[in-house]
Image: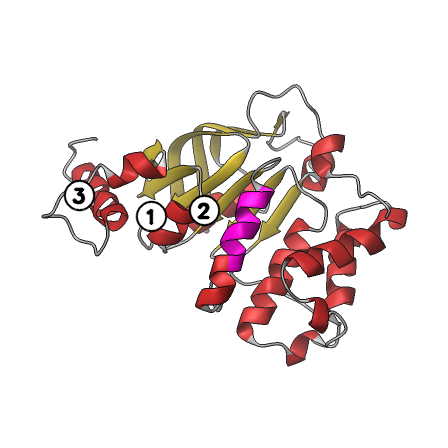
Amino acid sequence: MMRTVSAAETAPTTYPWAVHAEGLQVKAGRYLAVNGLDLALGTGVHGLLGPNGAGKTTLMRGLATVIKPAGGQLTLLGERVGDRADLRQVRRGLGYLPQQFGFYPRFTVREFVEYMAWLKEMPKSLVGGAVQRAIDRVGLTAKADARMKTLSGGMLRRAGIAQAIVNDPAVLLLDEPTVGLDPEQRLDFRELLRDLGVDSCVLVSTHLVEDVVAACTDVVLMNEGKLVYQGTPDDLTRQGGQGDAGDSPAERGYSALLRRHRAGEGR
């Protein structure tokens, strides 16, 4: 079997963090949605939590180099991201699934993932094997030659995940990846996340606190464009008490941290 070359093997190896932000500012239109964020992420699965309007999607777009930073410093895979940065090398090492992604409806799943591999400048000789592996990993083997327009919402989401992982990215950014997945598919996705996090830096934005606790090695909590908390899922569950909102220790910890932040209490 032909072995695919991962982005982690071709990206620079001297950087201490895959993602490093200091005082990062990113705008959503004219609004400064990420304002003074400090963040350092290495290998593993990092769950990004926060209420609506916290700046999670804008942060993901900034890390994906879709939006240039408006201020502060951002370093991805050892490369400083800014107005004069050559982003081609960085982008070869990234995988990104936005909340909503575009595709040609008449493309098959295989054609869609192949097209995205081409956009990521993968070597032609490696594309076929990498595409099949990505499709298999998201459970779409039987639908590989089905047209995108025929897929259900959950299948489309899995096709989006396949294109994000086809290049074995060193940094993988997934914005609300479990939308449309049924409970069984979510369990499979958690297993995939654990596997991906062995060699890559994976950042998953979600509203599902339980998915973060089950699949992530690290939790990042944002509110109003700033970092509220970063720590382990176990530590998150210890933050809450019986008087805090939530149906589980993790949800109560999440609620408690937000409440303290809004009250200016810190942790």
In primary-sequence order, the first of circles 1 and 3 is: 1
User: How many residues crowd around disc 1 within 10 Å: few (fewer than 14), some, or many (20 or more)?
Assistant: many
Classify mark 1: helix, strand or loop: loop
Query: What label sits on residue 259 in the rendered view?
Result: 3
Identify residue for label 2.
Answer: 215
Residue at the spot 20% in from the left edge and 54% down from the top edge: 246
Res 9 quadrant in image: top right
CB under 8 Å between discs 1 and 2: no
Q: Find the distance from the CA under tag 2 to the CA under tag 3.
A: 25 Å
Disc 3 is placed on an element classified as helix
What segment is highlighted magenta in the picture? 188-196
* Identity of the residue drawn at 77% across and 56% down: 131
Q: Which kind of residue does numbered mark 1 sit on?
A: Gly
The location of residue 214, given as percent across then percent down, is: 40, 48
Q: Amino acid under label 3?
A: Arg
Indicate the position of residue 89 as horizontal and vertical percent values: 73, 35
User: In this picture, is 117 found above or below 229?
Assistant: below
Residue 96 image point, x, y percent = 60, 50
Q: Is residue 225 visible?
A: no
Q: Identity of the amino acid at label 2?
A: Ala
Residue 59 visible from this viewpoint: yes
Residue 85: image tag: none
Among the two numbered marks 1 and 2 on one chain, the one whose residue lies closer to the N terminus? 1
Question: Going 34% across and 51% down the picture, which residue do you hit?
Answer: 209
Q: Which residue is mark 1?
A: 50
| Nearer to the camera, 218 or 136 | 136
In the rendered structure, which disc, 2 or 3, sits on the residue that comes first in sequence? 2
Residue 61 spot, x, y in % from top left: 53, 47
